Amino acid sequence: MSRIITVGAAQLGPIQRAEGREIAVARMVRLMERAHARGVELVVFPELALTTFFPRHYLENIADADPWFESAMPSNETAPLFAAARRYNIGFHLGYAERTEDGHHYNTAILVSPAGEILLKYRKVHLPGHAAFDPKRAVQHLEKRYFEVGNLGFPVIRAPMGGIELNMGMLICNDRRWPEAWRVLGLQSVELVMCGYNTPSLNQSAAGFEAHHLRVFHSHLSVQSGAYQNATFAVAVAKAGTEDGCELFGHSIIVNPQGEIMAQATSWDDELVTADCNLDMCTLGRTTIFNFAAHRRPEAYARITSQVGAEQPEVWQGK
Ligand code: ING
C-alpha cells in the first residue's frame, strides 16, 4: 500500500510593518480553508509568517524588536491557526520569531498536528547577513542581530500525518543553501523537508550585481539538489511581494526525491500550491545512488566538521 500524503505550499504575499499578526493569521486561515477544499493534509507556511521580515529594519534598542516575537505558541493571535487545524483535520508548519521564557530569541519553525500538538521544533542555524548596522547597504539584513544560532540541531521526527506515518524535518530559508544541513536530515532518513523563506529579489549587499533570475535559480537549485541528494521530498514556501518597499520573490515549489519540481507558485501573493507526494519515491534513491551506508566515506570528510572557513591549498612545487 503506497504511502501518499497531499501537501500544500501556502505562499504568503507581503506583510507590512504596520500590519498586526491578526491580519496574517486571517489570511493563513483562508489558505487552510482552501487547502481543506482540495484535500490537503499538511500545509507549509513561510519563514517569519506572522510579521513583516523585520531583520531589514535597524532598531537601536534591540528590546524594541520584542513585539515581533512570540513568547507563547499558541497565543491569542495564533490560536485561530490551531483551531483551523482541528476544524479541517490538517497539520501545518509555521515559521515565526520565538522568544523563550528565559529570554532567548530564535528564528523558529514548528510542525503542528491536526490536534494541535507541536510535533517538532527547529531553530534556524544558518543566519545570513550581519549583526551591526551596515551603512553601505541599501537595506539591512540583521538576522545575526535579532536571532541566536539555533540550538536544536536539524531534527527529524517520524509522526502520523494525513493517515500515514512519515519522517519529517525542517530547514529555514538560508539553511537550504548549505548541503550539510540537508545531509544531517538525510542521515535521519527524512522523507519530507519543509522550508519557509523570505528572500529579497535583489542582492542587497554592496558586494556586486546579481541578476534577478539567478536569485530564483539559486533558490530552486538549492532545494532541488538537496531533495535529490537526500532522496526526500521538499516543500519550499515564500513570503513574497513588496514589504515596505522591499521586494521578496515568490516561486514557492514542491520537489520530489528525483529533484523535479512537481508544482510551483506563479504569483507573488497568497497562493496555495498542492501535490500528492508518494513517499515510496524516496526508496529508489536511498537504496541505490544515495544508499549512505553502502557509499559514504566519513573518514574522508573530516574537513566538513573540523573547519569553519576555507584554507589556502598546498602550492605545487614542480617536479
Ligand atoms: N534570506 C535570504 C536567503 O538565504 C540571502 C538571504 C539571499 C542570502 C540571497 C544569500 C543570497 O534566502 C534569508 N532570510 O535567509
Image: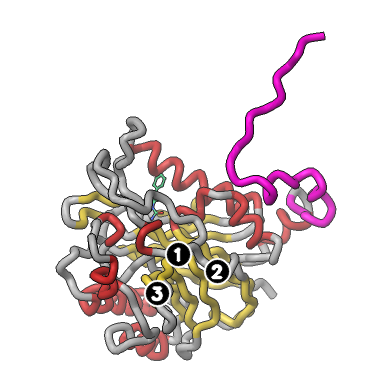
Label 3 CB sits under 8 Å from any ligand 1 atom: no
Q: Compared with residue 9, is residue 27 higher up or lower down, i.e. above or below?
A: below
Which of the two discs, 3 and 1, labels the residue nearer the N terminus? 3
Q: Compared with residue 130, is residue 206 higher up or lower down, i.e. above or below?
A: above
Quote the CA–CA distance across marks 2 and 1.
8 Å
**Residue 148: image tag:** 1
Amino acid type, callout 3: Glu
Which residue bears the numbered disc 2? 151
Mark 3 or 1, closer to the camera: 1
Q: Are marks 3 and 1 in contact (CB under 8 Å)?
A: no
Coloring basis for residues: secondary structure
**Disc 2 secondary structure class:** loop
Q: Residues within 10 Å of mark 2 (few under 14, many from 20)?
A: few
Q: Which of 1/62 is in front? A: 62
Bounds of the magenta segment: 290-319
Q: Residue at x 36, y 89 (%)?
A: 83
Q: Are marks 2 and 1 in contact (CB under 8 Å)?
A: yes
Amino acid type, callout 1: Glu
Amino acid type, callout 2: Asn
Quote the CA–CA distance across marks 3 and 2.
13 Å
Q: Is residue 263 visible?
A: no
Which residue bears the numbered disc 3? 98
Q: Which of 296/97 is in front? A: 97
In the rendering, at what x and y percent does residue 182 appear?
60, 56
Q: Which of 19/1 is in front? A: 19
Q: Which of 166/51 is in front? A: 51
